[in-house]
């Protein structure tokens, strides 16, 4: 990839948390980047540091519109498809819109990418695909039944990608993200992710509310590990590494109680009062998987994946970013 820096990379959902970090990274590596977003859940301020970069192009449009998708893929070498409506609770409250964006929009992007002869289509899959599978760690070839409309949509993405690989000869790679966190992740709104939400509450000396008793566990994955996986998926020359899916995680798990403990410890360095903020507990959330832990052996073997950031290391960087940018 070092000698091949003239690629044009389309990042759908490029104004979102993960997408904007990918835009920034690939611009820093000398690629041309096209950001395709309708700003339903993304933000213009996520693009402010590179909006005027000569190698950056913003296309406003909706993946639910086939014509918008066709316009976005013109002249593109690689697609990093991040656009989706996330959140299990949102999908339970509004399964139709979640399906329209995550399934119909995904299919629009696949068709447009096929017709434009893109070199490879890399897409954000989800750990929610494991559903009611109880085995740990999660291995890519063993999944259960989905527990939410969101999980169904992300599994359907994998099925469509496989069909397009087999039927049309497209190169596809799915990355099953496990609880991604880091800079630019939105702390506000009804469907805010747990880490930025807890950070904001603690900075305001408010009690974070944990769903359940806090013993549910997650494989929290720092954004820089995710960026590494996207780059590896895009650049790999290993023919055995394409047309499949990979866990994208750190390969360790921590409980929600562990998480809040780390957040209080790291934030207390900025404001010692945070160490004494009490934690509240409520009912478990519908559709939640009790425990999540990824095997990353497949990604290590086929892609050379080597995640650098544990939960603690990632939290230290994330907390520093939130303290500087969102107080």
Image (spheres, grey):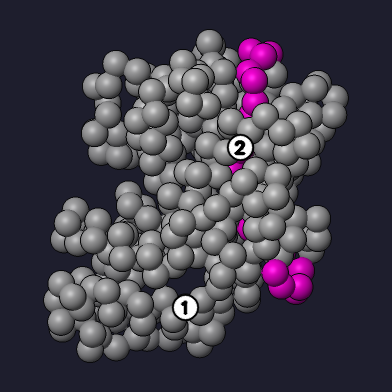
Whether the magenta-drawn stretch holds residue 122 is answered as: yes
User: Residue shown at 44%/81% (left/top)?
Assistant: 258
User: Residue shown at 35%/18% (left/top)?
Assistant: 55
Q: Is residue 241 above or below residue 256?
A: above
User: Residue shown at 15%/82% (left/top)?
Assistant: 272
Q: Which of 40 and 22 is in front in this view?
A: 22
Whether the magenta-drawn stretch holds residue 29 is answered as: no
> Is label 2 in a helix, a strand or a loop?
helix
Q: Which mark is residue 170?
A: none
Quadrant of image for the C terminus? bottom left
Q: Residue furthest front?
A: 3
Q: In this view, does 251 lie above or below 216?
A: above
Dot 2 crowding, Cα within 10 Å, few <14, some 14–19, many 20+: many
Residue 256 appears at what percent x and percent y?
47, 78
What's the distance in space between the residues labelled 2 and 1, CA to CA?
30 Å
Comes first in the chain, label 2 or label 1: 2
Q: Residue 233 carries which label?
A: 2
Q: Nearer the viewer, residue 115 or 136?
A: 136
Residue 193 appears at what percent x and percent y?
43, 61
What is the span of residues highlighted in magenta in the rendered image?
A: 115-137
Q: In this view, does 243 lie above or below 307?
A: above
Pointer 1 residue: 256
Q: Nearer the viewer, mark 2 or mark 1?
A: 2
> Is label 1 in a helix, a strand or a loop?
helix
């Amino acid at each position: 990839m070092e000698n091949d820096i003239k690629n044009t990379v389309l990042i759908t959902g490029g104004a979102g948390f993960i997408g904007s970090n990918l835009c920034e990274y690939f611009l820093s590596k000398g690629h041309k980047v096209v950001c395709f977003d309708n700003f339903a859940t993304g933000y213009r301020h996520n693009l402010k540091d590179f909006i005027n970069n000569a190698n950056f192009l913003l296309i406003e449009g909706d993946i639910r519109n086939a014509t918008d998708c066709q316009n976005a893929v013109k002249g593109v070498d690689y697609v990093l498809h991040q656009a989706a409506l996330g959140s299990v609770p949102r999908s339970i409250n509004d399964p139709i819109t979640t399906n329209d964006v995550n399934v119909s929009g995904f299919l629009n992007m696949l068709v447009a990418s096929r017709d434009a002869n893109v070199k490879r289509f890399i897409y954000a899959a989800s750990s929610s695909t494991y559903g009611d599978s109880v085995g740990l760690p999660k291995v890519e070839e063993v999944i259960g039944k989905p527990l939410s409309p969101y999980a169904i949509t992300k599994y359907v993405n994998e099925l469509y990608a496989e069909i397009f690989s087999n039927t049309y000869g497209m190169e596809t790679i799915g990355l099953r993200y496990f609880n991604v966190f880091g800079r630019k992740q939105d702390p506000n709104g009804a469907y805010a992710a747990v880490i930025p939400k807890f950070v904001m509450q603690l900075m305001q000396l408010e009690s974070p509310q944990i769903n359940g008793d806090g013993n549910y566990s997650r494989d929290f994955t720092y954004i820089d590990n995710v960026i590494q996986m996207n780059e590896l998926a895009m650049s790999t020359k290993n023919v055995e590494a394409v047309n499949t899916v990979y866990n994208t995680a750190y390969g360790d798990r921590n409980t929600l109680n562990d998480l809040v403990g780390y957040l209080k410890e790291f934030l207390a360095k900025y404001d010692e009062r945070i160490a004494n903020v009490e934690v509240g507990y409520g009912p478990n959330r519908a559709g939640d998987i009790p425990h999540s832990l990824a095997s990353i052996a497949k990604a290590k073997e086929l892609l050379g994946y080597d995640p650098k950031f544990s939960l603690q290391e990632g939290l230290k960087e994330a907390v520093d970013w939130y303290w500087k940018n969102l107080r």
